[in-house]
Amino acid sequence: QVQLVESGGGLVQPGGSLRLSCAASGSIFSIYAMGWYRQAPGKQRELVAGITRGGSTNYADSVKGRFTISRDNAKNTVYLQMNSLKPEDTAVYYCNGDLVSLRGRATYWGQGTQVTVSS
């Protein structure tokens, strides 16, 4: 059974920082791309940042220069460092991973972690 578990969300003041982590566990043979998405109330889920197994990254325009995605392949973990947070960054953040397990290749999602930016 493959699981992706996020951690690190919480309440932070505008201008503050948070670091999200997402660890994949289970019978995993290989993980290809991993990414972070977010969904604010009343809005569609959107891509925040993605990273390939080789380390190539892409970001939403709204977070470029403020957020940094990284991964530790040995730990099957992806991170999202979020700096200079704004109220509009408030959302539930989800990680996903394109991976190969005993069940074959599929995309898995975490359960989400709440990030609230407010004074």
Image (tube, rainbow, N blue to C red):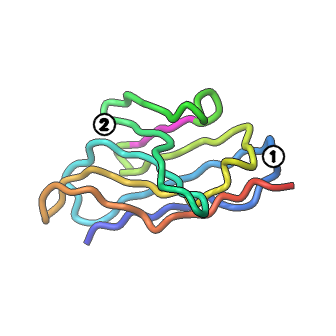
Q: Position of residue 28 (x, y in %)?
A: 23, 58
Seen as rendered, the residue at the extreme right is: 119
Q: Which residue is mark 2?
A: 53
Observer-nearest of 65 and 47: 47
Residue beneath the point at 50% across and 38% down: 69
Residue beneath the point at 58% across and 62% down: 42
Numbered range of the magenta stretch: 68-72
Residue beneath the point at 18% across and 60% down: 101
Dot 2 alpha-carbon crowd within 10 angstroms: few under 14, some 14 to 19, many 20 or more:
some
Q: Secondary structure at mark 2?
A: loop
In 3D space, how far apart are the residues under numbered discs 2 and 1 (Cα atoms)? 32 Å
Observer-nearest of 64 and 39: 39
Choose mark 2 or mark 1, whichever is in front: 1
Picture quadrant where residue 103 is located: bottom left
Q: Position of residue 89 (x, y in %)?
A: 66, 48
Picture quadrant where residue 58 is located: top left
Of the numbered discs 2 and 1, the one sitting upstream in the chain is 1
Q: What type is the residue that disc 1 sits on? A: Pro
By secondary structure, the bulk of the magenta-drawn segment is best described as strand
Q: Which residue is mark 1?
A: 14
Is 13 situated left or right of 94 in this image?
Answer: right
Q: Secondary structure at mark 1?
A: loop
Q: Is residue 81 magenta?
A: no
Residue beneath the point at 46% across and 45% down: 47
Dot 1 alpha-carbon crowd within 10 angstroms: few under 14, some 14 to 19, many 20 or more:
some
